Structure formats: structure tokens, C-alpha cells
């Protein structure tokens, strides 16, 4: 099966290791980073969502008008707009990008962050809302006839859109999480299910949970699986590990005295299951499997995609192939010096993985 690479559509040069040097939406930097991905073998980039961050849909539209090939993964939280309105926003962006859009629906793992934009539902209620929201968006993308809806969270009558996606029948739907509620909702509705990087054994367990949820929802297919890492690469193993320890030292310097890197996430007591899993893993040890390293996650409180893969390009590529062999066909990666790390990973890691995947696919076809 083909493999895809997802990077980050950052709108400024800040990261866990250094504060940004300019505005939160730096147009020149946004385009420079996106172009680095397009020119170095990446398939798509994620435009993330935060309560105080630039609007990811508009940032994505800006990039889509400047670049011809790079695909877009747009993060969206259902609490910020009505699903019929969101469906038109997504369809318009898919038209602007000429069919390069996938939408990543975020349920929200932190009550405080959700409440900043008026969302006071419990986590389980948010998952229920997200599932209903996705169902409505899918129908709005595909229905040419007016329809009514009366559900637990939304009610409307006689809606039909006059704005449809370029992709037919619709853009892809992406979803993530590590709780039973996440598996249930994403297993039922997602085309892509996203996981944060954990050891191979735990990742295999999560993949089986997603597949079981898809079967329980009556699906005959299953979501594609995406796993995310923070690669730290260098020309030799020794240099890579030196770079890894420098990276953690820089993160710790920024979090000294208990300072959180973002207003969205606690360093010590995260609410979301995914971050709790990352911290629990870090307590068990620093190194797992071929190259997985947990101190980067521990230093950030398990904030988002934060476990590293450390080593030479060959070592990191082989570690990624281990996940591919589990059934992961979308590999998400993001460095700490985003432009330079994007270029290095694209030059030195992506070609190895693509070549090895092509060999595996050829061998599979030959044996079939």
C-alpha cells in the first residue's frame, strides 16, 4: 500500500524549543514552511487549531492559492461553528485548493481550552456532538436535495447547500484520540484515524481497537491509520543523541518553574487520555523499540505529538517502516527547527521509506 507523509502547516517559527520571533500569523514564514514541504517530498500539512491561534482555514486557503501540489489537513473543532456553515467553508476551501482538502475533526481534550470559546459540554458529550457533526457535514457535502435534521445536539429544517466540494463524493474525514469514546466515534465516521507515537505493541493494540469500533458500527471498511512522531536526526547515531539531549534541555529551559508551553495544556496533569498515555509511558522508560524516545513528551507534559524518533536517517526510516508493517500508511512528522528539519527529513528519510515501501509492495504483488 502507498505511504504518505504529513507535516505541519505552522504559521510562525515558534516551537517547544524556542519562542516565535514575530506575529502569530507570519505570512512569509507560513508560505516558506509549506513550500519546504512541497519541494521535499511531503504529501500534506496540518493546519492546527487553538482558541487564540490564527484561523487555520484562512491560513490553509492562503497556502492553497500559492502552491499547486501540497495537500491540506484542516483541523476543526465543532464547538466553533454550526455544521451546515462549516460544510460550506470546507467545500469552498476544497474548491480553492482544487480537491486537496482533508478535514481533521477535533473533539477537544481539555475542558478549560474548550470553555475559552464557550463550550461547556463534558468530554463524552463532546464526542457525541462530534460524531453527529461529522454526519451532518458529510450529508451537506453530498446531498443535492433539501434535508431536515433533529438530533441530540443539532436541529434544522430544509437545508441544502449550493456549494459542493471539488472532490467527489466528498473530502476525507480525519479523527484522533486514545479513549474508548474516541475509538467509537472515529471508528464509525473517520476515513483516517490518527494516533500519537507509542511503542509498536501499544500502537498495534490501538489499531485493533479502531478496527473493532469500525466493525461494531457496521462498516465493511476500516479507517486508514496515521501515527505521529518528532524525528531527531543527524549524520551519526552519536550526533543524533547529542541533538536529542540538547532538544530536551531547550524544552526544559522554556518550562522551568512549571511554565506551560501553551495555554491549552497542563505540564503535569493533562485531561486527555492520549497525553496521559504518553506520560505513563515516559515513567516506564526512555527508549522503546528501535528508536522511540519519551523524554521530549515528558518535558512537555505529553502535549500533542511529542514522542521522538532518534537516530540517523536510516535508523529513523527503519523505525517508521516498523509502523508501516503494522498497517500504518500515513506517517506524521514534525521537527523543532521546523523549516530546516522539514528539509532534512524530506531529503534524507522520506526517500528511504518510499523506496522500501515500493520493494515491499512489489514483493507482495509477486507473491500474490
Image (cartoon, helix red, strand yellow):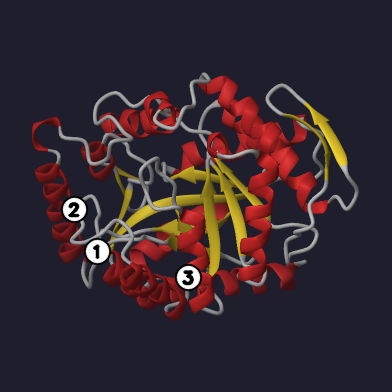
Looking at the image, is mark 1 or mark 3 earlier in the sequence? 3
- Categorize mark 1 by other alpha carbons within 10 Å: few (<14), some (14-19), many (20+): some
**Residue drawn 37% across the image and 33% down it:** 275
134 to 149, vertically: above or below = below
Please tell me in which quadrant of the rendered image residue 26 appears.
bottom left
Q: Position of residue 258 (x, y in %)?
A: 14, 31
Q: State the residue position of label 3.
A: 63
Cα–Cα gap, marks 3 and 2: 25 Å
221 to 178, vertically: above or below = below
Q: Nearer the viewer, mark 3 or mark 2?
A: 3
Question: Which structural element holds mark 3?
Answer: helix
Question: Which structural element holds mark 2?
Answer: loop
The residue lying toward the viewer, choosing from 64 and 256, is 64
Looking at the image, is mark 3 or mark 2 earlier in the sequence? 2
Looking at the image, is mark 2 or mark 1 earlier in the sequence? 2
**Residue drawn 31% across the image and 31% down it:** 279
Q: State the residue position of label 1.
A: 337
Cα–Cα gap, marks 2 and 1: 8 Å
Q: Position of residue 276 (x, y in %)?
A: 37, 28
- Categorize mark 2 by other alpha carbons within 10 Å: few (<14), some (14-19), many (20+): some
The residue lying toward the viewer, choosing from 95 and 356, is 95
Residue 191: tell me if it is visible: no
Cα–Cα gap, marks 1 and 3: 20 Å
169 to 283, vertically: above or below = below
Q: Which mark is residue 325?
A: none
Q: Nearer the viewer, mark 1 or mark 3?
A: 3
Question: Which structural element holds mark 1?
Answer: loop
Q: State the residue position of label 2.
A: 17
Q: Which part of the image, by quadrant, shows the C terminus? A: bottom right
**Residue drawn 16% across the image and 60% down it:** 243
Amino acid at each position: 500500500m502507498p505511504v504518505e507523509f504529513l507535516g505541519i502547516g505552522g504559521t510562525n517559527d515558534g516551537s517547544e524549543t524556542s519562542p516565535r520571533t514575530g506575529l502569530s500569523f507570519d505570512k512569509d514564514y507560513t508560505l516558506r514552511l509549506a513550500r519546504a514541504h512541497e519541494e521535499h517530498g511531503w504529501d500534506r500539512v496540518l493546519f492546527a487549531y487553538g482558541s487564540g491561534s490564527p484561523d487555520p482555514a484562512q491560513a490553509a486557503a492562503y497556502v492553497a492559492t500559492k502552491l499547486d501540489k501540497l495537500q491540506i489537513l484542516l483541523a476543526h473543532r465543532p464547538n466553533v461553528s454550526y455544521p451546515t456553515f462549516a460544510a460550506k467553508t470546507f467545500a469552498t476551501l476544497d474548491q480553492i485548493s482544487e480537491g486537496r482538502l482533508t478535514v481533521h475533526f477535533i473533539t477537544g481534550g481539555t475542558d478549560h481550552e474548550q470553555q475559552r470559546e464557550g463550550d461547556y459540554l463534558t468530554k463524552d458529550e463532546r464526542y457525541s456532538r462530534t460524531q453527529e457533526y461529522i454526519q451532518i457535514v458529510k450529508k451537506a457535502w453530498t446531498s443535492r436535495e433539501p434535508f431536515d435534521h433533529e438530533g441530540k445536539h443539532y436541529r434544522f429544517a430544509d437545508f441544502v447547500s449550493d456549494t459542493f466540494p471539488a472532490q467527489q463524493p466528498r473530502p476525507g474525514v480525519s479523527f484522533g484520540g486514545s479513549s474508548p469514546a474516541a475509538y467509537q466515534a472515529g471508528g464509525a465516521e473517520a476515513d483516517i484515524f490518527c494516533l500519537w507515537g507509542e511503542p509498536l505493541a501499544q500502537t498495534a493494540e490501538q489499531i485493533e481497537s479502531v478496527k473493532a469500533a469500525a466493525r461494531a458500527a457496521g462498516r465493511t471498511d476500516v479507517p486508514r491509520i496515521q501515527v505521529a512522531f518528532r524525528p531527531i536526526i543527524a549524520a551519526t547515531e552519536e550526533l543524533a543523541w547529542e541533538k536529542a539531549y540538547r532538544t530536551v534541555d531547550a524544552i526544559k529551559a522554556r518550562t522551568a518553574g512549571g511554565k506551560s508551553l501553551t495555554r491549552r495544556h497542563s505540564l503535569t496533569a493533562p485531561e486527555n487520555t492520549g497525553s496521559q498515555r504518553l506520560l505513563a509511558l515516559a515513567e516506564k522508560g526512555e527508549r522503546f523499540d528501535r528508536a522511540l524516545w519519551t523524554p521530549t513528551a515528558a518535558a512537555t507534559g505529553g502535549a500533542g505529538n511529542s514522542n521522538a524518533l532518534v537516530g540517523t536517517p536510516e535508523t529513523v526510516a527503519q523505525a517508521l517502516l516498523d509502523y508501516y508493517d503494522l498497517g500504518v500508511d500515513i506517517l506524521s512528522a514534525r521537527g523543532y527547527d521546523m523549516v530546516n528539519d522539514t528539509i532534512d527529513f524530506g531529503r534524507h528519510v522520506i526517500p528511504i521509506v518510499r523506496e522500501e515501501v515500493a520493494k515491499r509492495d512489489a514483493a507482495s504483488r509477486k507473491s500474490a
